[in-house]
Image (tube, helix red, strand yellow):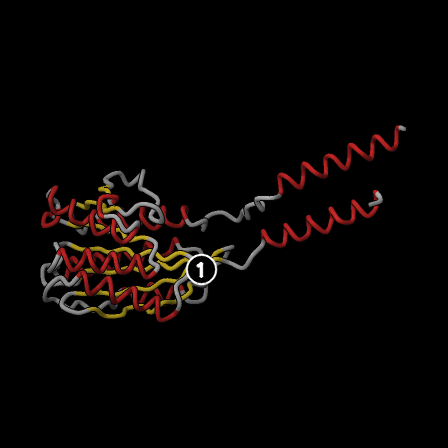
Amino acid sequence: MTRNKTLRAATAAISILFGAGTASAAVIDLGFVLDGSGSVSSYDFDSATAALSAALSQIPTSGDNQYRVAVTSYGYSSYTVVPPTVVTAANIASIQSAVLTAYKDDGGTDTAGAITYITDLFLDEGLGDTTLINITTDGSPNSQYLTESAALAANTAGVDGISLEAVGSGVSSPYALSNMARIAGLGTSGDADDGVIAADLDNLPNATETGFVIPVADFDAYGAAIEAKIGQVIDDTGGNTGVVPLPAAMPMLLAGLGVFGFVRRRQTTT
């Protein structure tokens, strides 16, 4: 191969590799589940919807990734507040407003049904590249066994992570938090023992890798927790960066180009 042909081939290879590095945008599914059971007062439920609505303002409306949000509420049954919707600058305000109208069901705490319900919403639309579910609750589920089974089924179906905020004294005991962590672990890695309790809002785990539960003192403190959670998730899913990683083969190609340059210099000086 002549020098010119070699350089043309190298240029073509660079074009191919950079083309691979600018693949279509990833779709990140963020599902938010609000406990509206009988143990949650109307005041506290309104506080939760207001806090979540405000925290959603952090979600990017442009960039390399698309964020698709769904919001549900539950008690005895589950209800769609916001169906899976790609967040844009044109619709973010309407999504936030819809959250404020979430239905409070009262009744029991069917967290198992709530997990299945929001999972099915995303499955019906086709799961994104990453699917994360966040559950806010003030009480233990009607059935720990069924909720663990639902979390594992969600993970098996393709959900990448489940995390929770355990709000109030009803779920503040080590036993209750441990059970919540089990649900998170099963929904994230398929292993209940992998779930952790994350009390430091400044050092939250990566929700795509570790299932966790955040203990929250009360619904007045929930705003800070959900704001930190969403901010961390956006960081961990690349929403706050516009950097497209170089293809893995790029270092080898650049090294090869260095060899071409060396050969060219040898030919010039001989």
Please state if 253 lies on the left or on the right of 235 as rendered: right
Q: Residue furthest front?
A: 1
266 or 142: nearer the eye? 266
- In the image, residue 53 lies at what x, y percent? 30, 59
What residue did someone put label 1 on? Answer: 27
- In the image, residue 175 lies at what x, y percent? 11, 44
Residue type of the residue flagged with mark 1: Val
Q: Quadrant of residue 150?
A: bottom left
- Check the picture and name the quadrant holding the C terminus: top right
Please state if 220 lies on the left or on the right of 264 as rendered: left
Residue drawn at (15%, 65%) of the image: 75
Element on which disc 1 rests:
strand
63 or 30: nearer the eye? 30
Q: Residue furthest top?
A: 269
Question: Please, is residue 178 above or below residue 132 in the view?
Answer: above
Residue drawn at (11%, 59%) of the image: 143
